[in-house]
Image: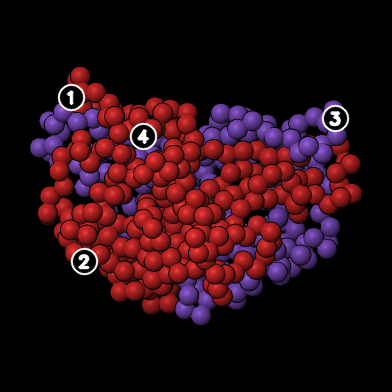
Chain colours: A red, B purple
Amino acid sequence: MPDFKAGPRSKVKRLHQRAHYDQETVYRLLDAGVTCHIAYVIDGQPYCTPTAYWRHGNRVYWHGSSASRMLREQAEGLPVCLTATHFDGLVVARSGFHCSMNYRSVMLFGEAHMLEDAAEKQTAVEAYITRLMPGRAEEMRAITAQEIKATKVIFMEIEEASAKVRNGPPADDEEDYALPIWAGVIPFTTVIGEAEACPRVAAGTPTSASLAPYAPGRALDEVLSDLSAAS
Amino acid sequence: MPDFKAGPRSKVKRLHQRAHYDQETVYRLLDAGVTCHIAYVIDGQPYCTPTAYWRHGNRVYWHGSSASRMLREQAEGLPVCLTATHFDGLVVARSGFHCSMNYRSVMLFGEAHMLEDAAEKQTAVEAYITRLMPGRAEEMRAITAQEIKATKVIFMEIEEASAKVRNGPPADDEEDYALPIWAGVIPFTTVIGEAEACPRVAAGTPTSASLAPYAPGRALDEVLSDLSAAS
């Protein structure tokens, strides 16, 4: 599996020991998430837009309404930087200086392009639904041609990528470890809650089998990683 | 309280009913989080960097090492877009087209500037620690002048801002509600886990009182909102 090269954009300058450029790490982190932020530039102004994404091979996709200004601007090969981050905890050190966050972050560089072909768009959107909810496409009302038309699907080929990971306890100054100060990590985990049925679901309608992986209390990143591994 | 104007950068073009420009909503969402993504441009290339932030008045701060390329470039009034997002759930509709995410997102526009004065930097960094862990500054080993020197503190004045919120059940096409398809929301919540002590904490050292708000099982956004309200 070829790894990503650390290019001028993706080379991690600080804390090199946290950096990873291997494709496996980059893909694994991408596959553990569904939401990201995308930076792009319009008329010199940077924008940072949150969105859902999905990966297929070395491409990352996102989508939205055909009326979206962001997606319209991104369609023409606009350079983008897509970052997906898991904030895993607050690192509480014995000194303020060494307080930190535990996180897993992946930063991708490439150009945004729009899928134009209706069949390709439909395939991509169905892949997204299946990635999140395997079998859901068959349970739902079928997508119409008009809906495909009203949907923009954008993708980027991952040209450069870097992952950055911090985990474990605080790294204090050696002489501070002896101080009688509690230090450690307050973990943060994004967990699944109890499914909330739409009030207009007809009485007696069973829960969707495609949502079974979203068991209450499970960590979202684990659910998503498992779904990716199974697909 | 003056509200933010919807300027050319911050005006929400799509789904206006989800948009808010009032200062109270913008501040409330900022104060419910501690992590964000910042978009900025270097030589035409957009970057999207995850970081921790804190708000004081109409300023938002972030910080890092003096060796950071990002912070060095941001110091000179670079335009930035700072976005903080809570992804609250997967909206599972009766059609793929109406599947969505529940989220609360706030997008800020302004220019990044660096705090130069050592005393101001120290005040800002201590405010950050106190915002997250009230009383922790007094528990910890004191910050040194060298550590302040080795820390960059960046701030932006919020010039334009918009909040965007989606919550509640799916909004399906009227004729689809009658279909025998389960629909609803799978909620996501970022929760606090059990504190993990650093293995080098001396036996008998009590847990830090300043970390009491981080009770296991609590929602992180609630903890942060409470801490902000109390400060």
> Secondary structure under badge 2?
loop
Quadrant of the rendered image containing residue B145: bottom right
Earlier sequence position, callout 3 versus callout 4: 4
Circle 4 residue: B186
Query: Percent position (x, y) of residue A74?
Result: 33, 69
Q: CA distance from mark 2 to mark 4?
A: 31 Å
Viewer-side label of 2, 1: 2
Earlier sequence position, callout 2 versus callout 1: 2
Circle 3 residue: B203
- Label disc, if present, on residue A116 of the rendered structure: 2
At 31% across and 69% down in the image, what residue appears?
A113
Q: CA distance from mark 1 to mark 3?
A: 58 Å
Query: Counting other residues with Cα less than 10 Å from the Cα at mark 4, is it few (<14), some (14-19), or many (20 or more)?
Result: many
Badge 1 and badge 3 both on one subunit:
no
B119 with respect to A26 (left or right): right
Please give the chain letter of the residue carrying mark 1.
Answer: A
Q: CA distance from mark 2 to mark 3?
A: 63 Å
At 20% across and 35% down in the image, what residue appears?
A139
Circle 1 residue: A202
At 54% across and 38% down in the image, what residue appears?
A189
Badge 3 and badge 4 both on one subunit:
yes
Quadrant of the rendered image containing residue B201: top right
Q: Amino acid at mark 1?
A: Ala
Q: Are marks 1 and 4 in contact (CB under 8 Å)?
A: no
- In terms of depth relative to the viewer, which is nearer, B229 or A112? A112
